[in-house]
Image: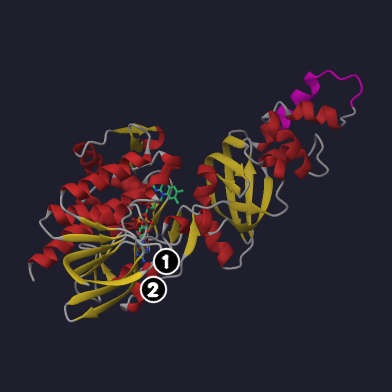
């Protein structure tokens, strides 16, 4: 059976749901196709289940966390800013709190509450959510979009259905965490409609060192320095906290350097991370401190065996780090300790891939999308929103704000477009 609707949105993630709500609030008849049974599956696991909705930094600072061209979403941001996003969620019954680093979370610290608020709002403004609907193809016939999808609602028989729409918003996300539904189908559909999709790679993903030491798993380092070297040139330096996990080096520091590091790995370049365990102290000061600490033990025989080296290390690092640090620092002596503390080297073998990446870098080329409306420059009535675009942010709420701002603008612009037909 063929159905028709004014605006069809593909994908009920944060971008698609916000687009649907804003279009319906403007008076348009809207339907959303979602291949999962429930909307917002990825949204429900964001922020370790707490959902870092946005970040309160002003645009001048906020924009430095958006890549590769923050200027592209300037209009979308001013149209539906971080402040407007907070106000909007508050107005639909979701209280929010601001935490360290200007990060905004639901007051309940439950990502499911954000999903529920958006789903309830879609319902309240009359958006039709068609779930278990996997979009297969789109053809642009006349001024309309004919969208063919598989209805997966019955486990016994998959039916192929068609929806015809006056305007189409593609909000199918990227390639990261494919288990949540974002498998990159939207890129194929955008390409089939004539759009260029720039080279994609995972971003905000763990970096796996060569000969990675298993006893490092789950150790968190606070206030350390991290330098990224590509082909032996230092290209980025950051300070903060990092975590060693089964997948490699991650945590906020690891993620901050991951975009450039993964891009370099994908290009076949040599990548190395160098950890400075004492970033606030110069090498000279550290040498003097090591000498002071050694003499404070007042050992009668000056021989430094492994047991004594461990006692010294205890003054410079958390206890759980000592064994893996020693294992990875072959030939360590009191004399070489200061250098090793300031330059702990991790040549990187590979990254964790899309399976564990927070976002996808790359996507639908920004050159072919009008930033003031999110409408395609190539196909009238076609709009894009969210991670499918060649836009990605750092950790800290920037990616969801990209989804909300581009989603809101795409929804409002599509509603305006259909009102003139
Ligand atoms: C573990 C994790 C934690 C994160 N935490 C945060 C955080 O705290 N703060 C933050 O700002 N960002 C976070 N992010 C990033 C953020 O979740 C994404 O950037 C955001 O969800 C992108 O929104 P989107 O709507 O564009 O895409 P998605 O959320 O991926 O939604 C796309 C939707 O489209 C549907 N779809 C795909 N293909 C089809 C098809 N063919 N037919 C029908 N439907 C389809 C998918 O099923 C999906 O529901 C996190 C990401 C991950 C993986």
Q: Which mark is residue 184?
A: 1
Range covered by the magenta-colored residues: 287-302
The image quarter containing residue 309 is: top right
Placement of the N terminus among the 4 image quadrants: bottom left
- Image: 332 above or below 231: above
Residue placed under numbered mark 2 in the picture = 188
Residue closest to the eye, 198 or 74: 198
Residue, far right: 301
**Tags 1 and 2 in contact by the CB under 8 Å rule?**
yes
236 relative to 147, above or below: above
Nearest the viewer among 22 and 335 is 22
Residue 283: percent from left, percent from top: 67, 37
Q: Badge 1: few (under 14), some or many (20 or more) residues near its Cα, within 10 Å? A: some
- In this view of the protein, which residue sits in the foreground, 112 or 47? 112
**Image height check: is 95 above or below 34?**
above
Left or right side of 347 for 254? left
Quadrant hosting ligand 1 = bottom left
Dominant secondary structure, magenta: helix
**Disc 1 CB within 8 Å of nearest ligand 1 atom:** yes
Asked if the magenta segment contains residue 419, the reply would be: no
- In the displayed orientation, state which residue is furthest to the front: 156
Where residue 410 sits, quadrant-wise, is bottom left
Q: How many numbered dots are placed on residues in this image?
A: 2
């Amino acid at each position: 059976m063929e159905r028709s609707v004014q605006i069809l949105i593909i994908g009920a993630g944060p971008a698609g749901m916000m687009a649907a709500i804003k279009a319906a609030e403007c008076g348009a008849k809207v339907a959303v196709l979602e291949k999962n049974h429930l909307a917002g599956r990825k949204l429900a696991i964001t922020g370790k289940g707490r959902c870092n909705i946005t970040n309160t930094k002003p645009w001048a600072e906020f924009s430095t966390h958006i890549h590769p061209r923050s200027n592209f979403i300037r209009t979308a941001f001013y149209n539906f800013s971080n402040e407007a996003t907070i106000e909007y969620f508050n107005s639909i019954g979701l209280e929010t709190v601001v935490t360290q680093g200007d990060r905004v979370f639901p007051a309940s610290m439950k990502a499911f509450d954000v999903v529920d608020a958006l789903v309830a709002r879609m319902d309240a403004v009359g958006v039709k959510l068609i779930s278990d609907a996997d979009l297969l193809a789109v053809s642009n016939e006349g001024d309309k979009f004919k969208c063919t999808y598989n209805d997966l609602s019955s486990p016994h028989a998959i039916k192929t259905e068609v929806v015809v729409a006056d305007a189409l918003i593609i909000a199918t996300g990227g390639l990261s965490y494919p288990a949540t539904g974002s498998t990159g189908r939207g890129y194929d559909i955008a390409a089939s409609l004539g759009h260029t999709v720039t080279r994609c790679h995972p971003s905000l993903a763990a970096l796996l060192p060569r000969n990675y030491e298993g006893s490092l798993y789950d150790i968190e380092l606070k206030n350390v320095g991290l330098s990224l070297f590509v082909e032996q040139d230092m290209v980025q330096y950051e300070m903060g906290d990092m975590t060693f996990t089964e997948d490699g080096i991650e945590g906020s520091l690891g993620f901050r350097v991951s975009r450039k590091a993964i891009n370099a790995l994908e290009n076949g370049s040599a990548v190395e991370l160098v950890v400075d365990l004492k970033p606030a102290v110069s090498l000279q000061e550290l040498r003097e401190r090591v000498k002071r600490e050694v003499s404070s033990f007042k050992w009668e025989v000056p021989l430094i065996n492994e047991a004594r080296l461990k006692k010294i290390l205890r003054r410079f690092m958390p206890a759980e780090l000592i064994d893996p640090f020693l294992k990875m620092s072959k030939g360590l002596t009191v004399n070489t300790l200061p250098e090793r503390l300031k330059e702990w080297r991790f040549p990187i073998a590979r990254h964790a891939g899309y399976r564990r990446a927070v976002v996808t870098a790359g996507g639908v080329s920004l050159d072919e999308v009008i930033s003031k409306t999110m409408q395609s420059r190539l196909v009238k009535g076609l709009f894009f929103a969210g991670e499918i675009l060649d836009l990605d942010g750092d950790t800290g709420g920037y990616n969801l704000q990209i989804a909300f701002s581009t989603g809101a603008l795409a929804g409002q612009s599509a509603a305006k477009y259909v009102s003139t037909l």
